[in-house]
Structures are given as C-alpha cells and as structure tokens.
Image (cartoon, rainbow, N blue to C red):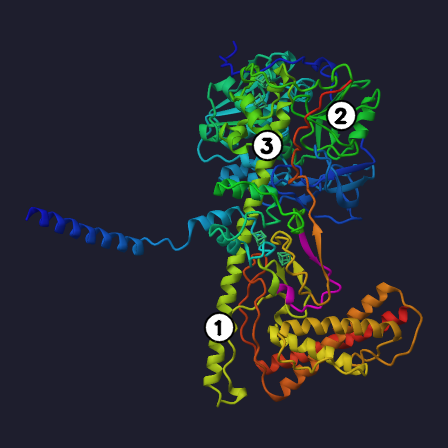
Amino acid sequence: MSFLFALALMAGLAVLLGAVLGWAAIKFKVDEDPLVDKIDAVLPQTQCGQCGYPGCKPYATAIANDEAPINQCPPGGTDGIHKLAELLGKEFIPFDDGGGAAEKPRAVAVIREDVCIGCTLCIQACPVDAIVGAAKQLHTVIESECTGCELCIAPCPVDCIDMVVVGENVNTWKWRYPVIQLKQVH
Amino acid sequence: MNAQIFPFHGGVHPPEMKDLSNRSPIVAMPIPARLSIPLQQSIGNIAQPLVSVGERVLKGQMLAAANGNISAAVHAPTSGQVIALDAQAVAHPSGLTQSCLTLASDGLDEWIAREKFDWRAAMQRGDAKAIREYVQNMGVVGQGGAVFPSHLKLISREPLDTLIINGAECEPYITCDDRLMRERAIEIVAGIAIVRQLLNAKQVLIGIEDNKPEAIEALRTALMGCGFSAQVVVVPTLYPSGGAKQLIKLLTNIEVPSGVRSTDLGVQCFNVATIYSIYAALEHAEPVISRVVTLTGNVEKPCNVEALIGTPIDDLLKFAGLKSPSDCIYGGPMMGFTLPSTQVGLTKAGNCIIAMDAANFPEKPREMPCIRCGECAVACPQELQPMDLYWFARSKNFGKAQERNLFDCIECGACAYVCPSSIQLVDYYRFAKSEIWDAERAKKSADTARERHEFKQFREEREKEEKAARLAARAAGQSVSARAAPKPPVGEVAATEASVAPIADGDDKAAKIRAAMARAAAAKGETPASSAAAPAIDADKAAKIKAAMAAAAAKKAAANTPAAHNPTDVAGAGLPQDTVAKPAIDEEKAAKIRAAMAAAAAKKAAKVAGETAPVVEPVIAGVENPVEAVVEKPAMDEEKAAKIRAAMAAAAAKKAAKAAQSDKDAQ
Ligand code: SF4
Ligand code: SF4
Ligand code: SF4
Ligand code: SF4
C-alpha cells in the first residue's frame, strides 16, 4: 500500500513540478536570445552587409546559432574577431585570404552636391538615416551619423557619392604603442 | 609660523634648473607680425568662430564664442586683420592640424571698447550665473596646463571649506608663476579675494614650494591688510607637489579618493596664473589674450615674457636667442611634450618652452626589462603600482589596467624618472589611455548606429502599414470622385526647404526618371530600350538602368551637340564638333539630365493638376534626426500644391536650360 502511495506521490509531484516548469517557461520567456545581444554589442553596427547578412543583428543571430564563422565582419577588424572569440570562447581565426574581408580605414560618404539630382535613392539605402534631403533637393550626409557602410554608393544613378577616409584629428589622435627598441647587433 | 603640512606619498626631486630664468623680470614680448590662434584652447568643445577672413578685429574682440558649457571663448590678442581661418599645426604632441585663426597684426594694438562688468552687483543679486557666463566669455581657463574652463569651478552650492591657491610650480625649469607672484602679488591677492567671495570660502590656503622665498615674501606682504584671512603655506620642494591631489593632501590632509572630485570634499584648487586672469577679467574687463611664459634651456637669455596668445613659438625662441637648432619641449620636462613644429602659436596652456640641449637632455637610454624592483611604486604620488600598469598596458590588457586605476595616473613621470631600467612608463600609460578612449568612442557611435538602424526598421514597418491602410481606405472610397477624395494623411514630412515641393513617393519618382530618360532617348531618334512602363522590372532597378543609359546617351549627345536650347530637346540635332573639355561635358550632362527631369516633372505635374488632385505621399527623410527640425505640415490644398510644383519645375527647367546655354556660350 505504502509502495503505491509513494509511487502516486512521486507521480503527482512530477506532474505538478512539470506544470510549474512549463508555466515558468512561458511566463519568464526571454524574448530575445541574450547571446545574440551580446554578440551584437561587439559588432560595429556599420550595418553594411559585408558579412553576407542584411545587418549586424542578423549576423549576430547567425553566429549565435553557429551558422556563421566569426571572421566575416570587415568593419570590426581583427580586434572585432578577437572580441568575438573571447566572448564565445572560440579560437581566433583571421580574415579569409581572398575572401575580400579585410580591414579598411574608417570613411564617411560625401555627396558631390553639384552633381546630385535629388533622387532620394540614397536616403532609402542608408541603414542609419544619415542622409538628409528631399526629392529634387540637394542631399547631404550627416558626417557624425554615417557609419561608412557604402550602401548608398551603388543606388546613386549619377555616381555622385564618394567615400572619404576620416583622418585623425587632435581629439581622436592616439598615442602610438611605445616603440620597443631592438638590441643593436655589432 | 608655517601651518602644519601633511606629506603625500612618493615624489621625486629632479634638478630644479629654475635659477636659469627666475632672476629675470617679466618683459613684454613685442607684438609679432602674425599670430596663429587655435580655436580650441580649453578642454571640451572647440570654440565657434565669429569673424570671417579679411575682417579687421580689435584687441580683446571675441574671435570665437564658447560652444556649450565645457568650452571657453577666444579673443583677439591684438588689433589686425584675420587673414586665414583654416587647419594649421597646433601645439599638440600629434603634430596634427586643427582650426586656427591667423591674424596679421597692424601694430596699433587698438583695444575694443571695454565695458566693466559689475560683478559685485551681480553677486549681490545672487546672480552667480551671470558671473560664470562672463568669466566663460572672457576665455578664462586653468593656466596650470590643464586648461579646464574656470567658470565651471566657480560653482558653489554651499560655502566652500577650503580654497587652495596653487603656487607650488613644482616642475623643473618653469618660473612663470614664481615671477608672477613676485611682481603681481597685489593683483593675485585681489583675485583671491574675488574667488573667495564667489565661492564663499571659509579658509584660503596658498601653497608655495620653499624654493621660492621671494614669492612667498611678496604674497605675505600683499596679504597684510587685504581684509580677509589667507595663509601662505610653505611646502617642501618635492615634485609633484603642484598636482591638485598632492597639494590638497599637503595643505589639508584630505585624500581625494579615486573618482571623487575635490569639490565634493569641500576643496577647490586654482592656479595663481588663473587667479590673475580672473582678476583681470572681472576688474579690468580684460579677456585672456596673453600669458607669462618661461623661455629657457638652450637659449642665450633665459627669461619670462608676457606673450600674446598665438605668438609663434619661433618668435619666442628668437626673442630669447636660441643658441643652436634644438627640439623644444612645450610645458615642463616631466609632463610636457616635444613640439612637432615651432611654427605653432602659443596657447593658454603654454607655461614654458624649453629648448633642449644635449647636456641636460641626453638621448634616452635603451629600455631594459622591468626587474620589478618596486622603485616606481615608491615614487608614485598617486599610490599606484606603475609596474603593473606598465605590464598591462604593454600587453594591451586595458581592462586590467583600468581595474588598477590607470585613470588615476596623472602622468607625472615620477615613476619613469626613478626606473632603473629606463622604461618610458608614461608613454605606455598614455598609449593605454588613448586606446581606451578610442574604444569608448567607437562603442558610443556603434550604439547610436544601432539605435538609428532599429528606428529606421521600425519606421519602414510603420510606413508599410500606413500605406496598406491608405490603400484600403482608397479602395473603400472608390466611388467618391477624386476631387472629393480625403486628403492623404500628412504624418511626418521632412521639413526644411522641401516644404513647397512635396516629396514624391519612390514610384512616382522612378516614373519621372523613366519618363525623362524615355524623352531623352526619343529626342535622339533612338527607340527606347524598353517601354516607359516596364512592369516586369522592379521600379527602382528600372530607373537605375535607365538613368545609366540616359547618362550615357546624354554624354554622347553632349559630345557632338553644340547647344541644348530647349530642355525638352535634350539630345538636340547632332552637329559634330571638336572634342570638348571633359569637365564641361560632365557638367553639361548633369545640367541636361536635370533639365530633362524637371521638364518631365513639370509636364506631368501640370497634367495631373489639370485632371485630378494628385495624391501626395510623403516620404520621410531623416525626420528623427535631431539636427533637422521636424515640422508637422498642414495638408496643403492638393490642387494648389500641384500648381506650385508645376510652376517650380517649369522654372527649374528654364533655369537649367539657361545654365546649359550659358555654359555653352562660355566655351
Ligand atoms: S559586416 Fe557590416 S553588417 Fe555585417 S556585422 Fe560587420 S558591420 Fe555589421
Ligand atoms: S551615408 Fe552612405 S555610407 Fe554613410 S551610413 Fe548612410 S548609406 Fe552608409
Ligand atoms: S622602477 Fe622600473 S624596473 Fe623597477 S619595478 Fe618599476 S618599472 Fe620595473
Ligand atoms: S606617471 Fe602615473 S604611475 Fe607614474 S608616478 Fe606618476 S601618477 Fe604614478
């Protein structure tokens, strides 16, 4: 009798706890994968699609699902790969040779204003709304918001958008890594 | 009768080298012919220029206004003409350029009309804000080297416990504060009285190192009978006793913990030169247009000169008699940096210029590995572990370095001074700090980019929904005549100059481009490659292809067409001509495309206006952008809008045609 009772009790408990767990899974469901957000936080948010995904978040999702290698983001640079490797506990892998994915200096788009016909195509292409303008009006790029993704270059029917490399200025200049002098060989 | 002092940890005592220059009184430097005045002369935002090239300015006239709270104004040091406003080399270790105003002095040194500011009345009104603004507009910044805008330090919510006046001047070679205290003690004391009153300070302590007995004497004399109690505290000569934290500890025994501002502990620190500037600004309405600077080292007559801000360093060195060409240090030998060029102008931060001679500045010995002797930790006045910081900075382990309070390091160089392995420790700290700052900047811009991208996605989604809703509404109200159709919702329209010309929807625009291209092709007598309404191809793509085609056609046409008299007659009759200069072709082509587009648009708009009121679909262009004022535009009467549009387009077409014509004529 007591054996049956114990069995029933256990079964009952199992059902109850199962229900609680099930309820908790629904109630406390995490909408977004925290890993995706963490990866997304490391990506440079250029939204350029050079990784083969339509933006940084989709690439982050692909990495989180182990569908993409971590060396596909050129704007992130080698540093970015290092950060991803550290975050995911993976081995560092360099950019593919010949894959076209390589580091580039930071650049911003500049519209040649005398050529712009005001077609608004670049506005629609810009992932971060860094271009202001209206139909048949001059368009211009807000430099501080441009991520340098180059997505506005191709749509321009009159090819009036150039990428201009942003140099350092006094306020963004970095001290160089102190040169380690080599031993003199006599 | 000296007050008690409380030694700080560490410190070093390098050769003082002050007797080179401390015996020569301050002399006024002659007005240079050309002054190069950087617009950024304080921490924070770069000042915004108020004058234009060619303008004549008077001495003391504001050349650039403070931009935001953490910024300070810049003034004309003498009268003359602004001859350039461009990027020029500035006194910065990078050797990079920055916006500078170049002033050609006229030698008249003519002051602008000055109006004295009655700060006492403002004080009585309790209008501390007006005083701070005035100080900011006078361009007063910390002249000890940090160039922190002084008005930010004149804020006090409650009475300040201790006001500390920093006359320590602990770095070797520098004697400008020493001379200033000796020669202008009365003014300094008057300045102290002002600041003391502004901050409602209970106690005033003036810290001066014991190697400046004359300055101590001068200030003590000036303080007698000044009407308030202030004490000159003599501190032992030990570098870096002039560091804010070190001086505070010396005089008050208060240790300012990491990440805490001294103000929160009831202590505020001002350099004597800054005090003098505050005095000159509030009592004589004199902005900061000059400063005392020590010229020393490898020069004939080391001295202290009162030089105008913007005076080229070259002129200063010539004045002091540079013995032989040598690199120069801007600032002191411990915390200064080697000037990349001596063409740069003096800034408000420039307290000392040292021409380096081989004897006192031998080549730096080769770095040896760290032997972890701990000497650096003994010397560090900030009680850090320099060897650990070095290790982490060197291995680029910036997180760890930050954990060990890298940002508490004041870059005093005491550690590098004592290091038996001759490691240039400070270089590593500077490197690590700038890497960390850069990473933070990158993170910030990535965050804004993410936000903006997400907003754009959200906006596109919303637009789609709105469009669907509109279509549904239109389908429902099909029977109603077009004229009576409800006005389209004008939710957000990108404001700005586009207000008159309603923004065309993507399809609308694509159609216009297509129409223009078709016309261009037709006018040339070619068969259009595809019918104007190519339904199979995505509208955007079609437009692009057509645009490219039309561009090619236009170019071709331009190459053998003398003129396009009529915008609709883009290609014109093919009269062969000699080769035309290429830029001209491009321009002409662009003008023609524009003309064709405008004409097509005009025609279409006119037609539409004649038949039915067009449905204007607003396109939002960067509405969420903060710089763009977003204006809710009332829905304009459709017919009127269409007419205006037609008129505008026609005008544009005419203008473009004329431009094309005149271009042609010019050739
Ligand atoms: S390649 Fe471009 S879109 Fe892809 S993750 Fe990098 S920045 Fe984002
Ligand atoms: S302006 Fe061009 S390059 Fe810059 S973010 Fe927008 S689409 Fe990319
Ligand atoms: S003084 Fe130099 S050698 Fe000694 S522990 Fe510090 S860094 Fe290392
Ligand atoms: S430079 Fe930095 S680490 Fe070195 S002694 Fe000065 S405060 Fe300490």
Give the vertical position of B661 relative to B223 (above or below). below
Residue B466 - label: 1
Residue closest to the far left: A1
Position of residue A135 in the picture relative to residue B358 (left or right)? left
- Name which residue type carries label 3: Ala
- The residue singled out by tag 3 in the image is B432
- Quadrant of the rendering where the C terminus of chain A is positioned: top right
Query: What percent of the width, then of the height, locates residue B469?
Result: 46, 76
Residue situated in front as seen by the camera: B422 or A67: A67
| Residue B572, picture quadrant | bottom right
Residue B328 - label: 2
**Residue at the (58%, 29%) spot, across then down:** B393
Query: What percent of the width, then of the height, locates residue B262?
Result: 49, 28
Nearer mark to the viewer, of 1 and 3 = 3
Q: Which residues are magenta?
A: A108-123
Marks 1 & 3, CB-CB < 8 Å contact: no
Sequence order check: which comes first, mark 2 or mark 3?
2
Q: Ligand 4 is located in which of the four quadrants? A: top right
